[in-house]
Image (tube, rainbow, N blue to C red):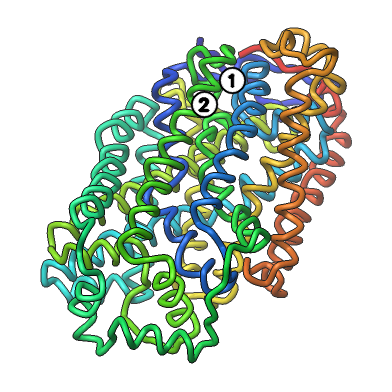
Amino acid sequence: MAASTPDMGASAKSAFTRTASGLVREMSIWDTALFGLLSTGGVYSFVYLYPFPQAFSPGVSVPWVILLTLALGVIVYFAYAGLGSAMPRAGGDYVYETRTINRVIGFSIPWGSNIIFWLVFPATGAYVINSLGLQPIFSAFGLESWASWLATPTGGFLFALLVILVEWYLATGGLRVFRRAQRYFMVPCYVIGGGTILAVFLFKWGINFEQAFNSYNAAYDVTYAGVKEAAAQAGYVATGFNLKNTLIWIVVLAGTIPFSMFAAQGMLGEVKDASNFGRLFRAFLLPGAVMGIGMLLIPWLLLQRVASVEFLNQFATAYVNGTVTVPYSPNINIYVQMLAPSKWIVLLVSIGFIGGGFGISSTVIMNSARVLMAMSLDGLLPAFLNKVSAKLFTPVRALTIYMCVSIPIAAWFNYGNQTVVLAILAGGMVSATLVVGFSCLGSALFPFTAPEIYEGAPVRHMTLGRIPIITLFGGAGAACIAVLIFWAITESALGLTTTAGRVALIGAYGSGFVIYYLWGWYERSRGVDTSLTTKEVPPE
């Protein structure tokens, strides 16, 4: 039920009061599952699986990376379904962590992860649509001038600006507008792109891959045999399975498959039946399984069957080390084109990347605005951020401000120092994993640090002996992610051991602590006691 929100800045108060958010529960559980599928990025996630893991981490097994990440995802889905069904309101990680850990961590970690790092995702989504979607389509259909212009910094920025405006419209137009786009555009794009990849690999099962590779690369003077020689020049040595080199790449993929629970990050105040643990868990698990098994694992196994693991590793090593030069990144969409060199195949696969770009950036934008709104509702940010349109039932102000800030980020993304840009992108993936780790920790502590809320939670009856099941799942998730984060900041292959990467992490999370204490000091000077805001979860 919609209700107006009070202006917390109108007068000084000694105690905090709060009414309903103004959001309306318009999303069904099915909508929630589709939202989660969009949040995984679809076929876009292949860019994290090849060619860099093979070049930097000899012995990495992509199938095991996928399967182990999905296993971690199941733990995450349980933890978030437990927290979300107990606290089904806007704000996600911010709400869970402030109520189960403490206010400082609960504000600063989501601030760095869900707000600061995610500002780059509108530009990232536009980049995916542009470089992996439109440019290949234009090139395949002979529109090289358009493809070349989109590849320039100016073309990239102007296109990103257009995408940001479209996403702003989808996000502020109300959930009805977004749900239509989700059902009839973005998800169908996933199906078309992923289905085409599967179909090509299945129908080309017995193809002579060496011949197909040589034919596709004849114009670049690159051959199958030449790639093997180039890999040897780059120092490639055949390596058996390496467990650690496999595990460290879960850090990156953990920002995709487990994120099919992404509605729990901020949208549960708008989901029907969000207090039903079982339905919520299934809404997270189904898209995670579709993504991990149907859109990543099976296509990859088919690619390995067609091209061989050895050659995939050799091409990755030669390409990344510069001993072979081709005008494309050797990813799964390129292998599809080698097997089926048709402009129509290019079109269909590229549609999948277009859907992935829109999906991952749109869901981030919508969630970030809800996190800002929740922080504001609790008095930890200015009150104007929590205003919800009485007509559209969306936090239009928070969305608009967030999108406006993302525009200069998009300009920097296209014109700025690319070393720093890559560091921010790597930090964004790792920060997504970090915030999930803290929420898993919060779920482990939930029965003990928030007993009043836990007593009303659907998971309260789930125990193993006297131990709450959510404590076991949350503790396991937090422990796994702690190891992954350690590797993320110590393994050079993951891109965060550079000065730029570490400065980005310190700056993002440090700004959260600074804002928390400065705003708290300002509110106390006005007589507002914000310490009361996180001691209970008001009903929606």
Q: Nearer the viewer, residue 118 or 161?
A: 118
Residue at the spot 68% in from the left edge and 23% down from the top edge? 83
Residue at the spot 34% in from the left edge and 88% down from the top edge? 226
Q: Nearer the viewer, residue 55 or 123?
A: 55
Instruction: Give, as a three-letter code, the residue at label 2.
Output: Val
Relative to residue 375, is residue 354 depicted above or below? below
Relative to residue 91, is residue 320 depicted above or below? below
The disc label shown at residue 21, or none: 1
Local secondary structure at mark 2: loop
Distance between the alpha carbons at the discs numbered 2 and 1: 7 Å
Callout 1: few (<14), some (14-19), or many (20+) C-alpha neighbours within 10 Å? many
Which of the 4 image quadrants contains residue 430?
Answer: bottom right
Let me know if residue 397 appears in the view.
no
Which of the 4 image quadrants contains residue 185?
Answer: top left
Residue at the spot 76% in from the left edge and 14% down from the top edge? 463
The percent coordinates of residue 199 (x first, y second) are 22, 48
Local secondary structure at mark 1: loop
**Contact? badges 2 and 1 (CB < 8 Å):** yes
The percent coordinates of residue 522 (x first, y second) are 83, 41
The C terminus sits in image quarter = top right
Which residue in the structure is indicated by mark 2?
Answer: 388
Instruction: Give, as a three-letter code, the residue at label 1.
Output: Ser
Residue at the spot 53% in from the left edge and 28% down from the top edge? 267
Q: Is residue 247 shown left or right of residue 44?
A: right
Which of the 4 image quadrants contains residue 189?
Answer: top left
